[in-house]
Amino acid sequence: MSDATDYTPPKVWTWTPGNGGQFANINRPVSGATHEQPLPVGRHPLQLYSLATP
């Protein structure tokens, strides 16, 4: 390996959007919710959920 490098990082990083492929939108440079919507409410005061169990 060489200690010399020709790469110089830019002073300001800018995001270039994906190419529109199937997985182009799973890695974004921002975090948080993508949309605002009310949370679903169950019929009972204490609603239990079970995933993949009988």
Image (tube, rainbow, N blue to C red):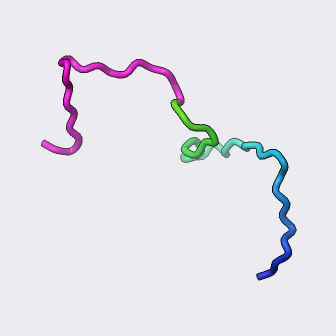
* Percent of width and height locating residue 28: 61, 42
* Percent of width and height locating residue 51: 23, 41
> Can residue 42 be found in the magenta stretch?
yes
In this picture, is 34 found above or below 6?
Answer: above
- Using residue 44 as the reference point, say whether residue 13 is left or right of it: right
Per the rendered image, the range of residues in magenta is: 34-54
For the stretch drawn in magenta, the main secondary structure is loop
- Using residue 53 as the reference point, say whether residue 4 is left or right of it: right
Quarter of the C terminus within the rendering = top left
Q: How many marks?
A: 0
* Percent of width and height locating residue 2: 81, 80
Q: Which quarter of the picture shows residue 19?
A: top right
Q: Which quarter of the picture shows residue 12?
A: top right
In this picture, is 43 found above or below 49?
Answer: above
Instruction: Name the residue located 18 percent from the left edge and 18 percent from the top edge.
Output: 44
- Using residue 31 as the reference point, say whether residue 3 is left or right of it: right
Instruction: Name the residue located 19 percent from the left edge and 23 percent from the top edge.
Output: 46
In this picture, is 26 found above or below 33?
Answer: below
Q: Which quarter of the picture shows residue 5?
A: bottom right
Which residue lies most toward the left here? 54
Quarter of the N terminus within the rendering = bottom right
